Amino acid sequence: MGRIYNFSAGPAVLPEEVLREAQEEMMDYRGCGMSVMEMSHRSSMFQDIIDETEADFRRVLQVPDNYKVFFAQGGGWLQFAMVPMNFMRGGRADYIVTGQWAKKAFEEAGRFGDAAAIASSADKGFTYIPDCSDLPVREDARYVYICENNTIYGTKYHFIPDTKGVPLIADMSSCYLSEPVDVSRYAMIWGGVQKNVGPAGLVIGTIREDMIPQEDLPGVPTMMQYRTYIDHGSMFNTPNCYAIYICGKVFKWLLDMGGLSVMKARNEEKAALLYDFLDRSRLFRGTVRKEDRSLMNVPFVTDDKDLDAKFVAEAKAAGLENLKGHRTVGGMRASIYNAMPKAGVETLVQFMEDFEKKNLK
């Protein structure tokens, strides 16, 4: 069986060019006689890999000089705890709840201080982004937290909330590096790379220097303190070496493609193909308010659970994988990340058109 079109929300599709390069270097990385997976993280060769990966990440995202970059294991759930443990410190923090992952982060923060949900879209099943022009931000809040792209529900902030001077922290996991970002508008950005950047098991983040606690935090484990990662170049313990290596290749692929402005245009073109079909379809419909639609995750339904299941099964047989919606919402979801080629979306739309003709009552 050849390559299929993989619409998984994560772990997700990677650029074929990157996979081929990794394949070529699997047994022998640049003449060293071993794979990166076998390499000591204390070797000069791996130090070069992580240094180059960070430098390219900074170039891709245009990270300002007064921001530090870190690589961490543990995924999003660990960040849900690390953020309040480092920045809340028994005080207050405000959360905008626009989906399951923002809700989980908000609930986790409640373990460490006074967390408040100052806006939410739960009233309509997280199918929109709430108005953030005049939020009830508490003056003494340590930060405001958002999940910028909601993987399950297919919504995206197409604006930066007005936090009234309170530092903004964003989980960008499923829209990471899909479009240009003004990093200076945020106190911290983080993302699990398994959705749009690399293989599972790694978080990459960037924090403004004045946010980083300068002393040891009582009661906070060593590996839960951002200062540990910053002070040791993310090498205090053994990092996820192979994921860092693959992400480095993805960053070079992005730079070779022309950077994030080019990538945004490509993503808008792909998303338009699918959304335009959904808007004219008599069988399928999108579930998100139009102005809040994600370029990365596109949920849709037929409003018939049996027909949804039939669609997913027949799509799989046709080489269109992982189109089943998240278990909490059902329906279908197509994740069309950076590495999904336009041809994949075109093939999906053609399949949907054919399915509609055969099944429209």
Image: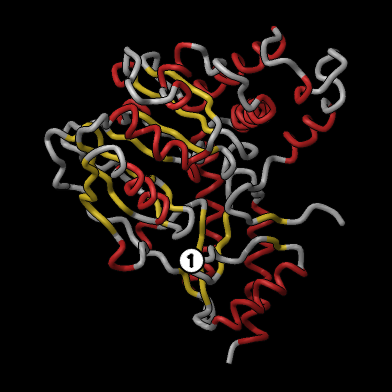
Left or right: 154 in relation to 235: left
Does the rendering let one see residue 256? no
Which residue is depicted at the point 26% across and 29% down?
89
Left or right: 233 in relation to 249: left
Mark 1 surroundings: few (<14), some (14-19) or many (≥20) residues within 10 A: few
| Depth order, front residue of 338/264 | 338
Residue 118, image x and y in percent?
20, 50
Left or right: 21 in relation to 166: right
Colour scheme of the rendered structure: secondary structure
In which quadrant is the C terminus drawn? bottom right
Q: Quadrant of residue 235?
A: top right
Which residue is depicted at the point 58% across and 53% down?
9
Q: What amino acid type is highlighted by mark number 1?
A: Thr
In which quadrant is the N terminus drawn? bottom right
Query: Which residue corresponds to mark 1?
Result: 328
Q: Quadrant of residue 15?
A: top right
Does the rendering let one see residue 287? yes
Q: Secondary structure at mark 1?
A: loop
Which residue is depicted at the point 53% across and 35% down?
74
Residue 246, image x and y in percent?
68, 30
Residue 172, image x and y in percent?
44, 40
